[in-house]
Image (cartoon, grey):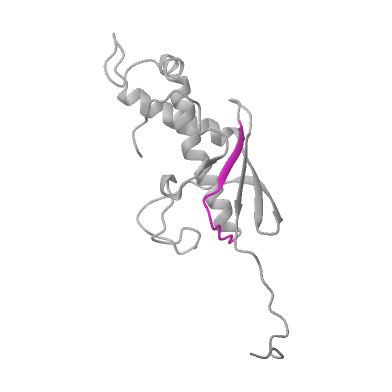
Amino acid sequence: QRPPRRAGLPGPPPNTPMSADTEPNVTTEHEHDQPSHDEGHDHAPVEHEASVERTGSRVNMKITVAADEVSSAMDDVAGLFRQRAKIQGFRRGKAPMGMIRQRFAEEIRENALEQIIPLHVGHEIRGRELKPIQNPILEDVDFEPGTPMLIKVHFDVEPEVEVSDYTDLNA
């Protein structure tokens, strides 16, 4: 995992394109959804509820991530901050977790969102075999600790074109 970074804002701003190269635990080198997948590493199961609405070539997606999964991601990120934080009066990695959570609350939240959002959006796109022609645009993230996270994104896919009765055309 990459080290946490400090930033002033919690999570990506609305209407921000999501880049595929920032997706944690997702690569384009091999398929992850195949039962015979054995690449020498493990991936956490991705579970969420999703609804997809398609109007022409526009896809609107709403994903609800369970509160316990969001909490687990926040705990993992807080643990990374704890390992790396230099806090006066404590050896590195020994500061109380409550102090870490309080001092780095916004950074922990941002890093957790940066892990959760691309993971779930990417999983849903692959699971539905959608082929976006652009990076998904993050519309909204509704997240409060202890509650499920709601993610709203939209993107365009190639339009479906039906070719009918082309044999009677003359050049």
- The quadrant of the image that shows the N terminus is top left
**Residue 50, image x and y in percent?**
66, 47
Q: Is residue 114 above or below residue 46?
A: above
Q: Is residue 141 magenta?
A: yes
**Residue 147, image x and y in percent?**
63, 29
The single residue placed furthest to the top in the displayed view is: 89
Q: Nearer the viewer, residue 25 or 44?
A: 25
Q: Residue at x 56, y 44 (%)?
A: 137
**Residue 23, image x and y in percent?**
44, 46
Q: Nearer the viewer, residue 161 or 117?
A: 161
Image position of 35 (left or right of 149)? left
Q: Nearer the viewer, residue 120 or 90?
A: 120
Q: Residue at x 50, y 26 (%)?
A: 10
Q: Is residue 104 magenta?
A: no
- The quadrant of the image that shows the C terminus is bottom right
Query: Toward which corner of the image does residue 49 lie, by quadrant?
Result: top right
Q: Residue at x 54, y 52 (%)?
A: 123
Range shown magenta:
129-142
Q: Is residue 48 above or below residue 140?
A: below
